[in-house]
Amino acid sequence: MAASDVTRMSKVFRALSNKNRLQLFLNLLEESRLDLAKGRTHDCFLATIISNLRIGAPSISHHLRELESAGLIETSKEGKQLVCSIRPQVMKDIAAFFAAKS
Amino acid sequence: MAASDVTRMSKVFRALSNKNRLQLFLNLLEESRLDLAKGRTHDCFLATIISNLRIGAPSISHHLRELESAGLIETSKEGKQLVCSIRPQVMKDIAAFFAAKS
DNA sequence: TTGTTAGTTTGAGAACTATCGAAATGTTTG
DNA sequence: CAAACATTTCGATAGTTCTCAAACTAACAA
C-alpha cells in the first residue's frame, strides 16, 4: 500500500473517529438509503440532526466539513438548506480495504 | 445501530486515524499473514518497526497501546521481546460494518 | 557483576480538536 | 423592506494527542 494511500485512509478513519461525527454519518447513510428507496434525494436539515445529537449547530457544521474534506460526503445548497449525500465510491474503497485484509 | 456500538466503532476508527499508527497496524497485518503462511506467530521488534517509520521507540510503544486498547491487536512478552498479533474478530467486525453499508 | 538489548514510563511542549455563545451571512416569507 | 430561518464564521476555552528526551525496568550475555 502506497504511503499516500495510508495517509488518505487515515484521514477517512479520522473523520469517523468522533462519536458524534460517526453517528451523524450513520444518520446520513440511513437517510440516503431511505431516499434511494423513494427515488429522490433528501434534505438534511441541521435542525433535524441537532435534535438527534446533543450538540449545537456550529459543531454540526464543523463535523459536516470534516466528513466532506475526508471525501465521505458531498454537500450542496438548496436555498437556505444544506443537502448532503454519501459518496458511494469511498464506501466501496473502505469495504475493499478491509475485505482484502480479513 | 446501538449507541454503544457507535462508540465502540468510533474508538476503532480513532485507533486507525493516525498515519503512523495505521502504517504500524498495516505492517503487523502484513507480518501476521506471512506468519500464518509459515504456521507460526511473529516476533514484532520495535527496533525493526522504528527503522521503517520515522518516530522513536516511546511513540511506537504509545501507538501499540492505542491499538491494543481499541481491541485491534493483542500483545504479550517473550523474554525481552514483544509479540503482537492482530485480533481477527475486529477485522471481521469492521469489514461487516462497511459491507452492510455500501 | 557489569554491560547490552528491548521496551516502557514520565514529563513536557507544540499542535490539534470539540464545543460553545455571539455575531454574521444568505434566503425565503410576509 | 423587515422578520424569520438555516447555516456559517469567529473567538475562546477546555481537553486531547503526538512526539521527544531522559530516566527506568526487565531479560539476557560476558
Image: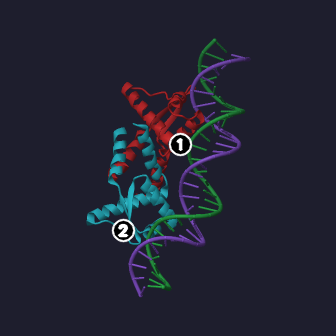
Chain colours: A cyan, B red, C purple, D green
Q: Is residue B48 above or below residue C10?
A: above
Q: Classify residue D23 as left or right of residue A55.
A: right
| Disc number for residue A36 | none
Callout 1 secondary element: helix
Instruction: Assess disc 1: are there few (<14), some (14-19) or many (≥20) residues with their C-alpha within 10 Å of its C-alpha.
Output: some
What residue do we see at 48% from left, 56% from top? A19
Q: Is residue A46 visible?
A: yes
Front residue of this view, candidates B68 and A101: A101
Which chain is disc 2 placed on?
A
Front residue of this view, candidates C15 and B24: C15
Q: Amino acid at mark 2?
A: Asp
Residue B34: image x %, image y %?
A: 39, 28
Which residue bears the numbered disc 1? B66
What residue do we see at 42% from left, 56% from top? A68
Which residue bears the numbered disc 2? A43
Q: Amino acid at mark 1?
A: Glu
What residue do we see at 53% from left, 32% from top? B76
Callout 2 secondary element: loop
Front residue of this view, candidates A62 and D23: A62
Residue A76: image x %, image y %?
A: 38, 64
What residue do we see at 44% from left, 54% from top? A69
Front residue of this view, candidates A33 and B70: A33
Q: Is residue A16 visible?
A: no
Quarter of the image where one finds residue A5: top left
Instruction: Assess disc 2: are there few (<14), some (14-19) or many (≥20) residues with their C-alpha within 10 Å of its C-alpha.
Output: some
Where, quadrant-wise, is the N terminus of chain B in this rendering? bottom left
Q: Nearer the viewer, mark 1 or mark 2?
A: 2
